[in-house]
Image (cartoon, rainbow, N blue to C red):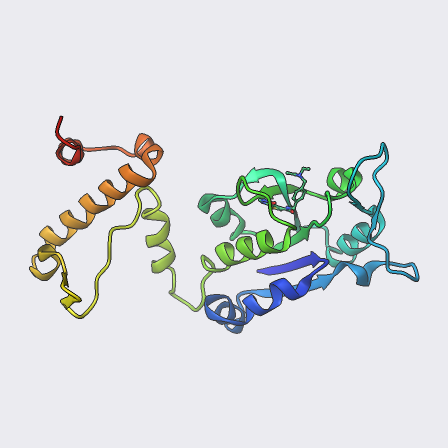
């Protein structure tokens, strides 16, 4: 996969691409990421990227010319998905990350100021994505979130799909607690089920903990999840007495 990013602050994005899974995926040759500065696609002496809004109001708008030049330069073949990161976009999810991981070329546009000229959105943008309902100062961090989520489901090396599989499967419920050595730390012990060596018991304990956490933190996820009789009985047993 190839990912091009158009940003006003490439330096926000670059260091995060040099470590961990994203670095390994790039080193394996399965992902090429290029981060471009929008100012490099300007044609005027002052490298102007923004201007005042028609109709007035506070804030600036990103001018169409540098964005048209950048997208046309970076997507010569015209097969790239052109994704604009915007608070007005469709919510980013694991399933969207997995769908995007099947593309061969993504071109990400990071906004700053109040947003981009509408003609860029109409003529060039194929997808608009938001990472959640909170206000950030630009699209660079959202682009990094998207790259991280998409990059980690790409194969790092041949036959390296299991971990990503496990992730999407476990998205239905929240993860259970984890413990490692020592068996006792500052008076806190590891749950007996995990020390039992009984794999059925361990699996049951983990599943119950996932149900409990999901009920506490994300009850709306349980509405889509097919609860068994045993699941319902367990959750009922966790409710405080009246
Ligand atoms: C005045 C209306 N604001 C929109 C909610 C203006 C505005 C605020 C923040 C315009 C752009 C931004 C910068 N944010 C992004 O570029 C952005 C973003 C976000 O703020 N939250 C979640 N996802 C995203 S994706 C891009």
Pick whichever, 26 or 35, lies toward us.
35
Q: Residue at x 90, y 60 (%)?
A: 46
In the displayed structure image, the side of residue 162 where residue 239 appears, left or right: left
| Image quadrant where residue 156 sits | bottom left
Quadrant where ligand 1 appears: top right
Pick whichever, 236 or 165, lies toward us.
236
In the displayed structure image, the side of residue 49 where residue 147 appears, left or right: left
Pick whichever, 38 or 79, lies toward us.
38
Q: Residue at x 57, y 60 (%)?
A: 1
Extreme residue in the bottom direction: 27
Percent position of residue 2, x then y: 61, 61
Q: Can you say which quadrant of the picture contains the C terminus? A: top left
Pick whichever, 147 or 87, lies toward us.
87
In the displayed structure image, the side of residue 58 where residue 204 appears, left or right: left
Percent position of residue 210, x then y: 24, 45
Relative to 42, is 29 above or below?
below
Q: Residue at x 66, y 59 (%)?
A: 4
Looking at the rendered structure, the number of numbered marks drawn on it comes to 0
Q: Residue at x 57, y 57 (%)?
A: 144
Mark yes or no: residue 147 visible.
Answer: yes
Extreme residue in the right direction: 45
Mark yes or no: residue 104 visible.
Answer: no
Percent position of residue 15, x then y: 58, 69
| Image quadrant where residue 182 sits | bottom left
Relative to 200, is 19 above or below?
below
Percent position of residue 26, x then y: 54, 69
Relative to 181, is 62 above or below?
above
């Amino acid at each position: 996969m190839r990912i091009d990013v158009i940003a006003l602050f490439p330096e926000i994005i670059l260091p995060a691409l040099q470590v961990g899974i994203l670095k390994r995926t790039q080193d394996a040759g399965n992902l090429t990421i290029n981060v471009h500065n929008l100012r490099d696609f300007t044609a005027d002496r002052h490298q102007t990227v923004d201007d005042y809004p028609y109709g007035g109001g506070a804030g600036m708008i990103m001018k169409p010319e540098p964005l048209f030049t950048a997208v046309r330069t970076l997507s010569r073949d015209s097969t790239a998905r052109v994704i604009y990161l915007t608070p007005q976009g469709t919510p980013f999810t694991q399933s969207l990350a997995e769908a995007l991981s099947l593309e061969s070329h993504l071109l990400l546009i990071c906004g700053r100021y109040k947003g981009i000229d509408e003609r860029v959105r109409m003529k060039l943008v194929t997808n608009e994505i938001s990472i959640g309902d909170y206000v950030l100062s630009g699209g660079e961090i959202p682009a990094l979130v998207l790259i991280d989520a998409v990059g980690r489901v790409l194969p790092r090396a041949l036959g390296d799909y299991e971990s990503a599989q496990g992730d999407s499967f476990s998205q239905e419920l929240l993860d259970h607690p984890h413990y490692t050595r020592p068996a006792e730390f500052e008076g806190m012990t590891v749950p007996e089920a995990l020390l039992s060596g009984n794999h059925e018991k361990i699996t049951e304990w983990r599943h119950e903990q996932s149900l409990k956490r999901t009920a506490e933190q994300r009850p709306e996820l349980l509405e889509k999840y097919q609860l068994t009789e045993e699941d319902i009985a367990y959750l009922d047993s966790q409710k405080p007495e009246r």
